[in-house]
Image (cartoon, grey):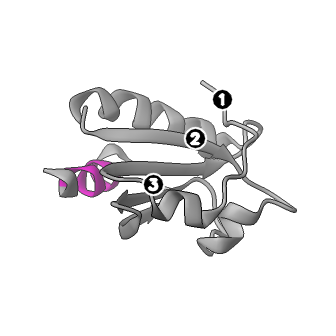
Amino acid sequence: MHYQRIDPARETLAATPGWLLLEFGVDCCPHCRAGMVLSAGLLPHHPAIRHLAVEDGKGRRLGRAFGVKLWPAFILLRDGEEVGRVLRPTGVDELEALLNQAE
């Protein structure tokens, strides 16, 4: 899995119904690669949550709109509204607690 080079407007995501996990990072970051392993292992157990892995960095509007300053950043949205976030998780428990909010 790789981060996608997309930059949707925050307004577009605000209009998205249901659960959405935004994962911000870059492929060359070891913390981000570890975060991708965590999310890949947990997301199959949460089929109601859509996942969008977004490449972040200089000039990327979406990460700035969410105030992302540390990678990886996991932001859980429900009907376009943020319900929680985890920054640079060190283990599965932090991310799992975030995803469990969708139950």
Sequence order check, earlier mark of 1 and 2: 1
Q: Which residue is mark 1?
A: 2
Give the crowd class for mark 3: few <14, some 14-19, many >=20 residues within 10 Å. some
Sequence order check, earlier mark of 3 and 1: 1
- Give the residues in magenta: 93-100
63, above or below 26, in the image: below
Identified by mark 2, the residue type is: Ala
On the question of residue 87 being in view, the answer is no
**Hey, which quadrant is residue 71 in on the image?**
bottom right
Point out residue 33 in the picture as x, y percentages from the top left corner. 61, 36
Element type at mark 1: loop
The residue closer to the viewer here, 73 or 77, is: 77
Q: Which SS type dominates the magenta stretch?
A: helix
Front label number (2 vs 3): 2
* Residue pictured at 39% horizontal, 69% vertical: 82
* Residue pictured at 45% horizontal, 54% vertical: 89
On the question of residue 102 being in view, the answer is yes
Q: Which residue is mark 2?
A: 53
Asked whether disc 1 touches disc 2, contact meaning CB atoms under 8 Å apart, the reply is yes
Q: Quadrant of the N terminus?
A: top right
Q: Which residue is mark 3?
A: 89
**Along the horizontal axis of the image, is 56 left or right of 94?**
right
Identified by mark 3, the residue type is: Pro
30, above or below 80, in the image: above
The residue closer to the viewer here, 64 or 18, is: 18
Point out residue 34 in the picture as x, y percentages from the top left corner. 54, 38
